[in-house]
Amino acid sequence: MKLAEDADLEKISKEAHGYCIRENMDVIDLEDESIDAEILNSMVVTNEHFQTAFGTSNAKRELQEATRVW
């Protein structure tokens, strides 16, 4: 299957980045205002992160639609 020209992989990656950061909380100092560049550069967004983000997005969308029905 082809990827449409309007598919924004960078935007999709940004949706999944929080799941990657969550997995690395043991090496991130929460009291710092920023995350060290070396730590950020060592992180990668995986397919599992995408699946989790999409699952969460779908659940939110389903909840929004269900509340509209009521």
Image (cartoon, grey):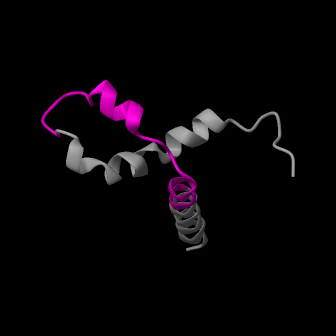
Q: Residue at x 60, y 33 (%)?
A: 10
Q: Quadrant of residue 30?
A: top left
| For residue 6, above or below residue 61 | above
Q: Residue at 57% of width from left, 71% of height from top?
A: 66
**In this rendering, is residue 51 above or below 39?**
below
Q: Pick whichever, 42 or 30, lies toward us.
A: 42
Q: Position of residue 8 (x, y in %)?
A: 68, 35
Q: Residue at x 39, y 36 (%)?
A: 42
Q: Position of residue 55 (x, y in %)?
A: 55, 64
- Residue at 65% in and 37% down: 9
Residue 43: percent from left, percent from top: 41, 40
Q: Is residue 36 left or right of residue 64?
A: left
Number of numbered discs: 0
Q: Is residue 4 above or below residue 60?
A: above
Q: Is residue 59 magenta?
A: no
Q: Quadrant of the C terminus?
A: bottom right
The reply to whether the magenta stretch includes residue 35 is yes
Q: Position of residue 2 (x, y in %)?
A: 86, 46
Which quarter of the picture shows residue 5?
top right
Question: In front: 31, or 26?
Answer: 26
- Residue found farthest to the left: 31
Task: Please indicate whether residue 24 sits to the left or right of residue 19 in the image.
Answer: left
Span of residues in magenta: 30-53
Which one is nearer the viewer's eye here, 52 or 60?
Answer: 52
